[in-house]
Each structure stands twice: as C-alpha cells, then as structure tokens.
Image (cartoon, rainbow, N blue to C red):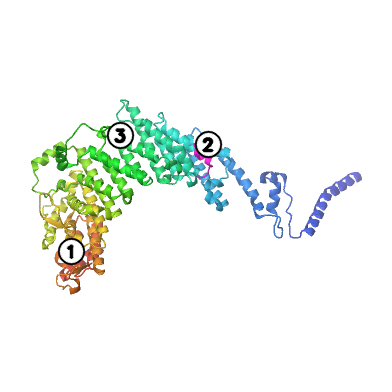
Amino acid sequence: EEKLDDRRTTNNDNNEAPKIQARESDDRLQGQHPQVLVPEVQTAEARRHRGNTTCEKKRHRVTEGTPHLAPSDTQCCFVARENMAGQHAFNDLLKKTEHYDKDERYMAISDLCEVLKRNAAQSESASPGAGSKGPNSNSSLDPQTERRICSAVLNLLDDSSNDVQTVAVKTLSVLLITVKEEQVREIADRLCTLVLDQNKSDLRDVYAIGLKTLVETVPSSMGNIVSHCLVNRLVEGIHSNSATKSSGDSAKDKNSEEIVLACLNVLSDLLTRFGSSSESVTAQHEPLLNVTLSQLASPRPIVRKRAGTTIGVLATVISDNLLHRLVERILDQIDQVSDGLGKSGKKRAKKAKKTDDKTLAASDLRSADTRSLIRTMCTVSGSVGQRLNQGHIDRIVPIFLRFCDPGDAVSGDDEDIDSDEEMNDAEEDSEGMAQMQIELRESCFAGFESFVLRCPTLIRPHLAHIVHSALAYMRFDPNYSYGDEDASSDGDDDSEDYGESEDEEYEDDDDMSDEDDDENWKVRRSAIRTLTAVVEASKHDPSSLWLDQYVWRKNSDDKITVSGALVNRFKEREENCRVDIIECFTRLLSYTVSAASSGVLVLASGDSMVDDDAQGTVQVDLRTNVSAAIVGASMKQLSGKKSGDRSKSSAIALLSTLCLAPGGIGGAGQIKSVFTHVKSILEV
C-alpha cells in the first residue's frame, strides 16, 4: 500500500509539472508583452478543422499595440476556410449536374448559379479598386475549377430538359463575368461552333441564345477578344449557308436558314456593343456590309427582314464613305425592282420602257422583296438620318412618295371613285399584296418622320409634298364610310363635322372591326405621326400649318389646312389614331400660343382688334375658325359611349390648352357644357 501511494504521488507530480511550466511560460510572456493575451491551447482536432495553426493563433491574438500583426493577417484564416468550403461546394454541385434525374440536375445548376453570383459579389467587394480591370480579374476560382464549371454549364445546354437548359443559359451570363479571359474565349468558340453545326438543329436556338448572352454580358475589356473569335466565323457562316434558290432538300434549306438568322442576330448584338470600339469589328465593316446587303436578295422573307435590321445597326458605326455606298446601293435596287404601288404605280410601270439590258446585280435582285428594301432604307434613315446629305434626301424622298402617292389614298366617303376599276384592282391584288402595301406605306411614313425630326433643313424643299401625302393618308380608310365628311373644314362648317351622325358611327365601330381584320389604321397612324413630326419641326413658327392649304380628298379640288384637317379627323374610329390626332393638335395649339407670346404671330379672337404694330404679322383667328369645332369635338369624346379613357384624357388636355388662347373655350354655354362633362367624369 505504501508503494502504491508513492507511485500515485510521483504520477501527480509528473502531471503537474507541465502545467506549472506552462503557467511560468505564460507569466514570462505576459511580463515581456503585457498587451498580448495568449489563448488556451487548442486541441489537435480543432487545429485540423481550422487549418493552418499559425493563422489560427494570429486570428485569436488581440493585436492592440502589436504593429507586427497586419489587419489582413487576422482574416486570412477565414479566407482559407471559405475557399476550401467553396471548392467542396463546387465539387458537389458539379457531380450533381451529371445526375440521371433531371430534377437533381435542375437543382444543381440553380445552386451553382447562386454560388457563382455570391462568388462574383465577394470578389468585387474584396478588391474594389480593380474595377477598371474588369470583374473577372478578381475571381477567386482556380483555373482547373473554372474549366470544370465552364464544361459543365456548356454540357447542360444540351440537356434533355428545357428547364435545365434555361437555367444553364442564365448561369452562363453569371459565369462570363466570373472566369478569366481564356475561359471566355473557349466558351465563345464552343458556342459559335455549335451554332454553325448543321447537325445541331434541335438545339440551335439554345446555342444562339447562349451566344447572344455572351455578347451582351461579357465585360467591355474583353470585347476585342470576343469579337475576334466571332466576327469572321459568323460572316463565313452566312456565306456558306446563303442560297439564292431552294436546293430541293427542305431539311437542309431550313437548317441553312436557321444558321443565317442566328448569325445575323448575333452580329446585330455584336455591332451594337462593340461595332465602333473593337478593332476586330471595325476592320470587318466592309465585308459585313457586303454580306448583309447580299441577304436582301434572299428568297426567304424572314432572312431579308433580319438582314435589314442588321444593316440598320451597321449604319450607325460605319464610316461616311461606306454609308454613302450603302445608301446608293439600296436606292439603286429600289429603282430597279419597283415603280410604286396602286394605280399610280401601274401607270408608271406601263409608261416605263422595260429592257433586257439589266446588269447582273439587277437580275439577282429581281426576286428581292421591295418591302424589304424600303424597310431597310427606312431603318437606315431612322438610325443615321442626320448623317445623310442633300443628295441622299433628294433621291430618297421621291422614291418614298412613289409608294405614298396621295392619288391612291381613298376613303369610304369618296363617292367619285370608279367602282368597277377599284373592283378589278381588288381582284388583282391578293391579300398578301394588300398587307405588303400597308407595311410599305407604314415604313415610308416612318422614314418621313425620321427625316423631318433629324434633318429639318435638308427636308425643307420636300416638306410640302410630305405634308400633302400625310394629310391624304390620315383619312385612308377604304373599307369604312363616316357618312358626314365634308371637305371644307376651315370655316364655320368645321362644327358641322361633329353632328349627330357620329354617335351612330361609334355604335357600328365594333361590328366593323369584328367583320374584317382591317389594318389600314396602321397607315393612318404612321401618317399622323409624320404630321406630329412636322408640328414639332415648326414649333418656333407654326403659322404655315394654320394658313397653307392642301388637297386631301381624292378627285376633289377642295383644300384644307393642317389644323383644319386634324380637327376634322377627331371622329377617327380607331382609338390609337384618334388619340394621336388629338395630341398632335394639342401640341400645335400649344406651340401656337407660345409663338404668339414671343411675337412671331398674333392670336386674334373674333371680337378683338389687332394692334397697328401687328399689322404685318401673321394672324390666326382661333375664335372664328376652329374654337367652336374644338369644343364640339371634345364634348363628343367626353360623352361618347365608345370613347376610351385615353381619348377622354386627351380631350381634357386639349381643352386645358385652349383656355390659354384668346377667347378660351368660348362663352357661358361652352364653359357650362365643359364643366358638366368634367363633373360627370369625376363622379364615376
């Protein structure tokens, strides 16, 4: 027993010795560095979980008064642990993306997308000063992980599940701002190869969306790299898949068409984003111009339309010399393939002497759609109208007027039309031809609108012809008769245009719309917008719009002013057009009041005298001419059963503007009527 007691005592002494030594060591350390607190000794298991022991000790020290400990060192262990956890998370998600269950793959790619978003956000916050280098420069992913993630996302673009494909495309947009340039180049090259592959027709739309996503989201610093990878291959893809006629193999023709459309679509986005900033794109402006122009002769309508859109984007970035060549080529093609629309176009075709001495370019363009050429020219005009010179305008406007001849603008109220001739023309013109005419005229008026707004000085010699055409087509409604249209609208007869018959026509409006899919209202709307552009261009001196008269009715010598025509057309049956008309006249009236305030013209009421100093100034008599018609037409809109909220709101805005003019909205009767209608609206 005594020996056992001695052994226990010896063991206790041995166990206490290390503790005493540790305490003595701690006392010495605290004596030398009183501001440093040493933590308790960590267990081996805790050290294994926390990583580097040195980093762990630095993280636990209180660093007050110890300059040798940098603040970044206290966080290095957190970063190491998070990086390790991130690697494990990526590995787990990448394994699940190959799972046989589509739901597992969907969840894996969704989680991967969220992890990449958080990783990108942390990388940006960790190095806020590196923004000029692009977000990809701060990526915390190692190259091997980046390649594995890129490969997994690209493989999921081929997934059998559409939901997985959709999330994969979404993930691609996040991945492109996370990985390095090398991976971005590989992704661009892989997607372009898949888009151009004839055997990938089932998933080509997905690949094209992925390629568009790449172009739209890749950092600007990588624009030249991406452009260098894509532009030449896309141009070659259009060349190799273009066809002037069907090959007889419908599947092959469809594949070729899809490839050309995808290439044109991606090129449009590429030109929009990097067309002027990337050297790889600017060096290819001329080849791009040639290949897109060649597609205007394609037998496929959708290819011609897409090519026109791409040309419109290209026109914004090419040089003036190339722009001049582009405009001249398009105008030459229009001259060669068409003489116009309607009976006027047929008359010109009969008078023109057709010869077989056509150039090769002309023979190639015989199958081209005139609509595509006009649409392309309108797109170019709308994009870079301010860069066109007087020679271009002088060539373009007559061609456009050829398709918007006022002599072809008919309405159901035109009683002098030769019905037999119109019936024969209707039989000759198919439904597709009628739709083409509507689109052509709509495009031409869109071009006029662009010219008037963007280059008002150059368009001034042609402005009268444009206004005449717009007034004629503002009433272009061959399938409907209002039954009360009167050509004289500038005198006291203005108010007679808004009689009781308008209530009847509004009641029959829906029946007429249901019976026929009449799209002529699109032509009327485009003509109204052209007039709105004319009003905007004349805002400093709108007197000509109140005084100059035009013939606007077919087979009639009666004339009308722009202001009178607008008031006359307040009865428009299509609300979209009606609202545009009211707003156009409201703008004209507002500019007129402002011009009167600045002394450009004089607004006179019927019972007021004009000052001697204003004898030589243009005078506009609203009270005598149009005030009564404005109030009457506005009351019709406020009380009409078929008038929509937009029409009523526009009518109230017009009356508010009229109150600023001399004489206002009229006498006590008109004021009472206006307040009665406004009160009824407020009580609803």
Query: In this rendering, would 259 be left or right of 508?
Result: right
- Taking 645 as reference, is 552 left or right? left
Query: Which numbered dot is residue 298?
Result: 3
What percent of the width, then of the height, locates residue 243? 32, 30
Q: Which mark is residue 96?
A: 2
Left or right: 197 as drawn, with respect to 438: right
Q: Is residue 102 visible?
A: no
Of the numbered discs 3 and 2, the one sitting upstream in the chain is 2
* Mark 1: amino acid: Val
Type of residue at label 3? Ser
Q: Is residue 582 visible?
A: yes
* Structural distance between the alpha carbons of marks 3 and 1: 54 Å
| Element carrying mark 3 | loop
Front tag of 2 and 1: 1
Q: Main secondary structure of the magenta part?
A: helix
Tell me the kind of residue under disc 2.
Answer: Lys
Front residue of this view, candidates 460 and 496: 460
In the depicted view, which residue is nearer to us: 266 or 47? 266
| Nearer to us: label 3 or label 1 | 3
N-terminal-most mark, 3 or 1: 3
Magenta segment boundaries in residue numbering: 177-186
Magenta-span inclusion, residue 183 = yes
Q: Earlier in the sequence, mark 2 or mark 1?
A: 2
Q: Which residue is mark 1?
A: 631
* Residue 350 placement (x, y as % from top left): 14, 37
Q: CA distance from mark 3 to mark 2?
A: 46 Å
Q: Nearer the viewer, residue 245 or 141?
A: 245
